[in-house]
Image (tube, grey):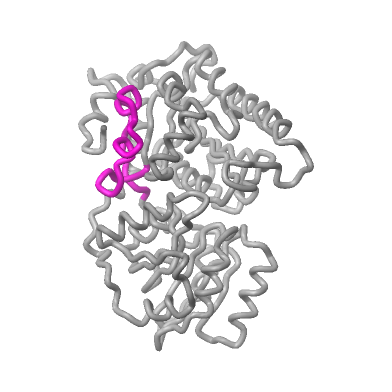
Amino acid sequence: MASSKRKRIDTPAAYQGRQGTPRIAFYSHDAMGLGHIRRNVLLGQILQERLNATVLLVSGALDACKFAQPVGIDYMTLPAFEKKSHNRYGARQWAMPPEDLVRMRAQAICGALDGYAPDVLVVDKLPRGLRDELVPALQALRSRGGTHLVLGLRDILDDPETVDQEWRAGDYTEFIRDTYDAVWIYGDPQVYNAVEQYNFPRAIAEKSHFIGYLDQRERLRLAPDANLHRVNNLLDPDHELIVGLVGGGQDGFRLAKAFVQAELPPDSRGVLVAGPCMPAERIAQLYEQVEGRANMSVVAFLPEADVLVACASRLVAMGGYNTICSALSFRKPSLIVPRVAPRSEQWIRASCLDRLGVLQTLHPNELTPAALTNWLAEPPAANIESHTCDLSGLERAANYIEALFRPPTGETMSASISESPSHV
């Protein structure tokens, strides 16, 4: 285990030779949906398994503990924020001013990370945390030294103009340059080159690594048996399975309703996963829609929906990061109906992959049950079997962190990473 008296660490190479069990922490604010925490849970599971690390997941997701929690991984769930509108957040459960909740969360994060003393901290998306709540903890870790700081960015944040405005307003460029040791981009530059599109300055580009999309097939190996049993009850060997996914479900009701109203091809069965964040009254409406239909089912929540995706013949879904990774990983013919507001991230991602011929995209303005019926009636136009998108993100992340603890070999970590074609 690392010593409590740590010197400041400026380069990954300084970690080589570290003894004991690695301590790895992940932070995500999770004010909307479960995409960030699901990504971090999967990364944490892989790192725990491969490095025998202890993993702490710091999140504002109320439903974080519904996911698999293997030995060596624990959660710290913060009092939750909720996204009220674009870039406007408020307390989800309490009548508390946002600034009071920020202060409370910041103190909790600081205390937890000070006590846990992680060797590596991976921060998801927001360099300074939600409303700068992570800044005190990052400053303390940097001052004490001994923690390698990584900023993890999904493949696409938003359109370049919006990202530029937000990064300028948040002073992100200088903060990333001065605070973080590395930037991981969970994507493939052949699909979308974030470094070029967002015009990263040289100081950030040099520490940025396209580690690849995260292969969701690993979830099957890590899925609990109880979840497999629940999925088996939804399968029928005499019918092809068509799966509908709407992410966490907060804003997925319109697609969910169109999916359960669509006419399915003969000898097929549809299963919609509504998501844990869909309001109960909305789920009740979906149950009413499928009442009496033997070929259509609604499931409120599955701890691991990818077990169901693996059995599907087709996928109809929104365009969140994890969902797209599932379509790519399991190579399922997919119709993506992405969110287009308040962020265009899903639309950009789906459109890029549509242009590559990997999947098909339907703008939400064109969404109707008839549009889904027509797509299901035709042979898939996209050839997902031929896609060559990089799915090595989990392996590269593990390699990166493992190298921090490797005994010296005369080569620096920076040199070994730079040999990867994903390095910028």
Q: Residue at x 27, y 21 (%)?
A: 412
Left or right: where does residue 93 sit relative to residue 341? right
Instruction: In the rendered view, tell whether residue 280 sits above or below residue 342.
Output: below
Choose top left, top right, bottom left or bottom right for residue 394: top left
Q: Residue at x 52, y 74 (%)?
A: 258
Choose top left, top right, bottom left or bottom right for residue 105: top right
Q: Position of residue 109 (x, y in %)?
A: 62, 29
Q: Position of residue 244 (x, y in %)?
A: 48, 69
Quarter holding the C terminus is: top left
Residue 148 visible in rendering: no
Q: Going by the picture, which residue comes out furthest to the right?
A: 95
Residue 363 visible in rendering: yes
Q: Residue at x 37, y 76 (%)?
A: 375
Q: Residue at x 54, y 39 (%)?
A: 28
Instruction: In the rendered view, tell whether residue 99 sits above or below residue 226.
Output: above
Q: Which residues are magenta?
A: 186-214
For this rendering, which residue is in front, 302 or 373? Answer: 373
Left or right: where does residue 312 sit relative to residue 193? right
Q: Position of residue 156 (x, y in %)?
A: 39, 45
Q: How many marks?
A: 0
Is residue 35 in the magenta section? Answer: no
For this rendering, which residue is in front, 421 or 259? Answer: 259
Instruction: In the rendered view, tell whether residue 303 sits above or below residue 29.
Output: below
For this rendering, which residue is in front, 138 or 231? Answer: 138
Q: Position of residue 232 (x, y in %)?
A: 49, 73
Is residue 187 in the magenta section? Answer: yes
